[in-house]
Amino acid sequence: MTKELVIVRPDDWHLHLRDKDFLPTTVNESAKSFARAIIMPNLIPPITKLIDAENYKQRILSALKPNLSFDPLMTLYLTEETDPKEVKEGFVSGQISAVKLYPAGATTNSRSGVQNFEKIKPILEIMAEIGCPLCIHGEVTDSNIDIFDREKAFIDSVLNKIRTDNPTLKIIMEHITTKDAVDYVFSVNKNLAATVTTHHLSINRNDLLAGGIRPHFYCLPVVKRECHRLALVEAVVSGSPKFFLGTDSAPHLDHDKESSCGCAGCFTATNTLEILAHIFEEHKALDKLELFTSINGAKFYGKNINSDKIRIIKKNKPTSFPEKISTPRGEITIFKPNFETKWQVQV
Ligand code: DOR
Ligand code: ZN
C-alpha cells in the first residue's frame, strides 16, 4: 500500500554549506527539500562582519540552480571582538537572522570563538533587547572533561548562567545529544529551544565504535548512548514547539574524514526527510513530522511558515540513495544509517 504525506516545505535551522567549489553541490542538495536554512558561519576565515555575510549570501545564491528556490538565512560568528552595533544593524535590517556562539576550540573552525564568556555580555544584552536569536554550540572545551560529558558540563557551567542572566534572550541549543539537554530544554522558559539533527536521531555510540570505527558517523557533539538517542526521539515526536530540525549537515571530503585524525560532520542534506519519515512512523508520530521540520523552527525564529508543500511517499521497497556526492575537489559520503527507509521525497 502506498502511503503519502503532504507537509509544509521544511526549513533547516542549522546547515553548513562551506564555500567556493562546494557550493554548487551543497546548495542544490539542500534546496531540493528545504525552503530556507540558517547558514553556519564557520568558514576559514569565519563570517564575522556583515559585509562577509552579504558576500557569502551572494555566492550561495549564485550557486543555486535556476529551477530551485532557497533562502539562505545568514548568521554572524561571535567573537570577543564582535561589535554590538554591527549585530544590531544586521538583525534590524534583516541581513542576519541569528548570531552563532562557538566556544573556542569546540569544533571545526571554532578557533576564533569565545573563551571568556564575560566579554560577550554587552552583545547578549543588545541581542535580547532587539530579539536576535543566539545559536549555541553547547559543549565545554576543557580537555579534562570527558568528551561524552561536555554537553552536560556546558549546560551546568555556561548555558544556565547565560540564560538566567538574559531571560528574554532567544537561545537555540544546537544539535543536542543527551537526555540531560532534553530535560533542561523542557524545564526552562519558552526562550530556550533546541535543534536536533538527523544523525543524532539515527545512531548511537555503538554505531560509531563497536566492531570498528566508522568515520562517517563521527560528528560533534559526538553521538552518545542509546538512552540519549531515545530521549531525543521522544522529544521530537512529542510535537513540543521547543524542538525543531537543524540537520547540521556538514560536508567534509572523504579523504579528510577517512584519515588518522578525521574531521567531524555527517552529510545528511540528501536524505534527511526520508530518514525522519521512517523514524517518526516507527514511533507512530507521522502527524508530528511537519511540526518538527516545518513549523516549530519558523515560529521560534519569528519567521513566516512556508506557503508551499512537499510530498513524501512510502513505497514497498527501500529507497536507494547515491553513496557519495561529487564536488570538484573530491567526493563526500552521504550519511547512511543502519536501517533502510521506504520513504521518498517527490521532486
Ligand atoms: O560535526 C560537526 N561538524 N559538528 C560541528 O559542530 C561542526 C561541523 C562542521 O563544521 O564540520
Ligand atoms: Zn554545525
Image: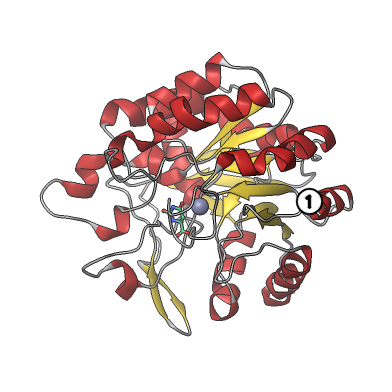
Say which quarter of the image contains residue 75.
bottom right
Image position of 46 with respect to 22: above or below: above
Quarter of the image that includes the C terminus: bottom right
Q: Where is residue 71? Give x, y as percent.
A: 74, 58
Name the residue that disc number 1 marks: 87
Q: Camera-side residue: 40 or 8?
A: 40
Q: Is residue 315 left or right of residue 313?
A: left
Q: Camera-side residue: 239 or 23?
A: 23
Residue appearing at x 29%, y 42% in the figure = 147
Residue type, mark 1 in image: Val
Q: Where is residue 186? Give x, y as percent.
A: 54, 18
Q: In this view, does 281 lie to the left or right of 7?
A: left
Residue appearing at x 45%, y 65% in the figure = 251
Q: In this view, does 14 lie to the left or right of 87?
A: left
Quarter of the rendered image showing ligand 1: bottom left
Q: Residue furthest left?
A: 211
Q: Camera-side residue: 30 or 299?
A: 299
Image position of 229 with respect to 139: above or below: above
Quarter of the image that includes the N terminus: top left
Q: Which residue lies furthest to the top in this view?
A: 187
Q: Does residue 283 appear in this view?
A: no
